Image: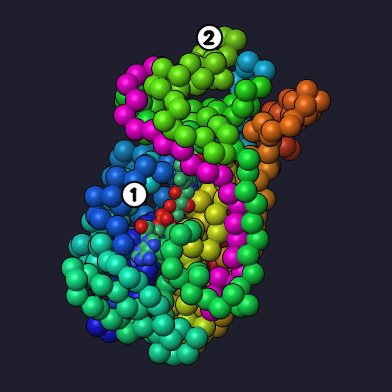
Amino acid sequence: MHTQVGIVGAGPAGLLLGQMLHLKGIDSVIIENRRRDYVIERVRAGVLEQGTVDLMTELGLGARLRREGLAHQGLFLSFAGARHRINLAELTGGKVITVYGQNELVKDLLDGRAASGRPLYFEVEHVAIHGFESQRSKITFQNNGNEHQIECDFIAGCDGFHGVCRPSIPEEAIQTYEREYPFAWLGILAEAAPSSEELVYTCHKRGFALFSMRSPKITRLYFQVPQEEDIANWSDDAIWDEMLTRMTTLDGWKPNRGPIIQKGITPLRSFVAEPMRFGRLFLAGDAAHIVPPTGAKGLNLAANDVMVLARGLTEYYTRGTMRLLDAYSAVCLRRVWKAQRFSWWMTQTLHRFPGDTEFDYRRQLADLDYITGSRAAMTSLAENYVGLPLDAPLT
Ligand code: FAD
Ligand code: DHB
């Protein structure tokens, strides 16, 4: 096979990139090592920034998102038994966030890919990338027992944190920066009508908890557990008891209880690989960086990376210049580090760390009291949460 851009990974980054390139008349082949159903059903992110929603609209794939997505004008920070609303829209000149499951977004993108008629291979094995340090990039893989080879001008490494692209870069050519957190999130989907129209981020003495939703009938909840926690240790009743202990406020607000239809544990990590490019290989999304989920930034950063990459590739194919591709890594990393900073800040503001003392808890409550009482502090949180503007125009 020959194509212009070989894309490894059919998560949000790979699928968005494929669609952006398609609309510019640029050919791509996408390969994905999981089954189609697995990719669609994987429960993950839920919060989309305005820029991500606008991108789906520009790609002609935003109709269902506009219909079913839940636009939120604000969110709550809850501590010491009370919820405090932060009016995101008012503080940011009208910007909102949209709650729409990542799996729904991926479904829409897969429909878009199918309609484009361009190739996407699922369940590929033994993926390897070659020649990207020169101009003879090549991806090899197996599919249904057959050997395949894609010759391409560029490789987009959109294969997530555990993919093969980043580890294929010579160690001395890439610098990584990392922080692990001593806790994880236990997350559930419950068949219960959301009891709040907006998200509630809770700092409780027993640890962080988060109230979110997926639809008018499905509630999405998380709470902080120790890093090595095993989901087998948590019966559904024990999960509800802990959720309700942490989230119930003095005015009696609490999530509605219902059957748990999905549960899992996610570790928290901050990670950045620099630069995000080696020769003709460009890393995008979780392949290049991971943020802890507290700031709801991971999926949106992936979307931002591929917007910058698509712009660079379009300029290359229309004008024959590498100018924007050469700037790719620096342009992305500026925004990535700001999102790292914000995600770290939200995480340490709202979570309890092992070894924290009563002093630390009091300081944390004072921090939250300050944030929810100062317009300047709320504005800072709001403008980061809804998404900072792009550092560079896209056209
Ligand atoms: P991925 O979605 O990981 O996609 C990579 C793809 O590559 C996968 O489909 C994988 O199967 C495939 N792949 C891997 N290796 C290979 C290979 N060798 N060959 C071929 N294919 C390969 N982000 C937010 O913005 N907001 C949130 O609210 C939020 N909440 C989250 C909650 C949870 C519980 C989790 C786990 C994550 C959350 N995130 C959130 C992060 C978000 O889900 C990720 O940042 C996002 O999925 C990144 O997209 P991606 O396309 O870069 O990577
Ligand atoms: C959701 C996940 C997040 O990480 C977050 O910060 C907010 C909401 C969610 O899955 O709905």
Display colour scheme: rainbow
SS class, disc 1: helix
Q: Picture coordinates of residue 200 (x, y %)? A: 54, 27
Please name the amino acid that badge 1 sits on.
Leu
The Cα atoms of the two marked residues, 1 and 2, are separated by 34 Å
Residue 171, position as x, y percentages in the image: 59, 75
Residue 263 part of the magenta-drawn span: yes
What span is in magenta? Answer: 255-278
SS assignment for the magenta stretch, majority: strand
176 up-or-down from 209: above or below? below
Q: Tag 2, which secondary structure?
A: loop
> From where the camera sits, is residue 138 visible?
yes
- Left or right of 154 in this view: 354: right
Mark 1 neighbour density, 10 Å: few (under 14) some (14–19) many (20 or more): many
Residue occupying image coordinates x 37% and y 68%: 8
Task: Give the residue type that dot 2 points to.
Answer: Gly
For residue 329, above or below residue 244: below
| Picture coordinates of residue 282, whole percent (x, y) | 48, 73
Q: Is residue 30 above or below residue 231?
A: below
Front residue of 274 and 147: 147
Quick one: which residue is furthest to the right in this view?
A: 359
Bin the neighbour count of mark 2 within 10 Å (Cα to Cα): few under 14, some 14-19, many 20 and up: few
Residue 342 to residue 8: above or below: above
Q: Earlier in the sequence, mark 1 or mark 2?
A: 1
Query: Which residue was labeled with disc 2?
Result: 252
In-front residue for pair 271/79: 271
Residue 69 painted magenta:
no
Question: For mark 1, what is the residue?
Answer: 105
